[in-house]
């Protein structure tokens, strides 16, 4: 939302600061989920998959956002990011009640 109302370097700095604060909790929670859900004999592979998926998602999002900003402006890119975040939050909410798989 900040990018739509403040499309300049200071606005970008605020968005990166807010977005960056989510990284440590994301990594910590994903690590705990891997340890809780994966057999100890496959834990290294599971951590590798989680890290690969995270890096791939970050790279794809950066490319998509850059392309949208270049082609359609900051407002369109901001709307797309808000939509994707909404989808991610909805997906997490749907899966909140499900039980973790047995080891």
Image (spheres, helix red, strand yellow):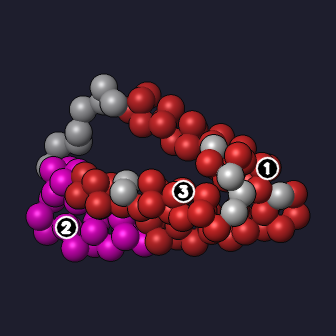
Residue identifier under label 2: 43
Cβ atoms at labels 2 and 3 below 8 Å apart = no
Residue 41 on image: x %, y %: 14, 68
Verify whether residue 37 appears in magenta: yes
Residue 10 on image: x %, y %: 59, 63
Query: Viewed as shown, does residue 66 lie left or right of 89?
Result: right
Residue 34 visible in the shown view: no
Residue 71 on image: x %, y %: 88, 64
First in residue order: circle 2 vs circle 3: 3
First in residue order: circle 1 vs circle 3: 3
Which quadrant of the figure has residue 8? bottom right
Label 1, label 2: how many angstroms apart (C-alpha)?
Answer: 40 Å
Verify whether residue 71 appears in magenta: no
48, above or below 80, in the image: below
The magenta stretch is 30-52
- Tell me what residue is drawn at x 68 percent, y 52 percent: 6
> Circle 2 — which element?
helix
Mark 2 or 3: the one toward you:
3
54, above or below 95, in the image: below
Label 2, label 3: how many angstroms apart (C-alpha)?
Answer: 34 Å
Along the line of sight, which residue is nearer the eye, 93 or 7? 7
94, above or below 14, in the image: above
Residue identifier under label 3: 15
């Amino acid at each position: 939302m900040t990018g739509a109302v403040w499309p300049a370097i200071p606005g970008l700095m605020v968005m990166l600061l807010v977005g960056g604060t989510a990284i440590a909790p994301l990594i910590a929670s994903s690590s705990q989920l891997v340890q809780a859900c994966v057999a100890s004999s496959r834990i290294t592979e599971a951590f590798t998959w989680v890290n690969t998926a995270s890096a791939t998602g970050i790279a794809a999002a950066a490319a998509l956002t850059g392309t949208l900003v270049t082609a359609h402006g900051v407002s369109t890119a901001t709307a797309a990011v808000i939509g994707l975040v909404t989808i991610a939050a909805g997906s997490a909410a749907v899966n909140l009640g499900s039980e973790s798989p047995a080891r």
